[in-house]
Image: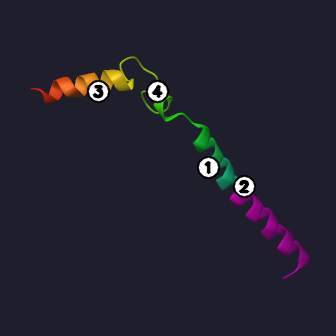
Amino acid sequence: MTGPAILLMALFIIVIWGGLVAAILMLAKTDDATTGELGSAPGTDNESLLQVNTSSAAH
């Protein structure tokens, strides 16, 4: 392999693996309770959802 080919290979390996590491770190920092479609909307906390679920199961 030529010098420029090795340089480009190293560059793209760093870009790809660096992106993977950055994505993993960002996902690790994200709080699952406040993300997604509902986010922190009223009535979507654990206590409210458990209360609705238990009252529905009683019927």
Q: From the image, state whether disc 3 or disc 4 is nearer to you.
A: 3
Query: Which comes sooner in the sequence, label 3 or label 4?
Result: 4
Which residue extends farthest bottom? Answer: 1
The label nearer to you, 3 versus 2, is 3
**Label 1 is placed on what type of residue?**
Ile
Range of the magenta residues?
Answer: 1-17
The quarter of the rendered structure image containing the C terminus is top left
| Secondary structure state at the residue bearing disc 1 | helix
Q: Nearer the viewer, mark 1 or mark 3?
A: 3
Packing grade of label 3 (10 A; few <14, some 14-19, many >=20) is few
Tell me where residue 5 sits by quadrant.
bottom right
Element class at badge 4: loop
For residue 9: magenta? yes
Q: Position of residue 45 (x, y in %)?
A: 39, 23
Q: Is residue 11 magenta?
A: yes
Q: Position of residue 25 (x, y in %)?
A: 65, 46
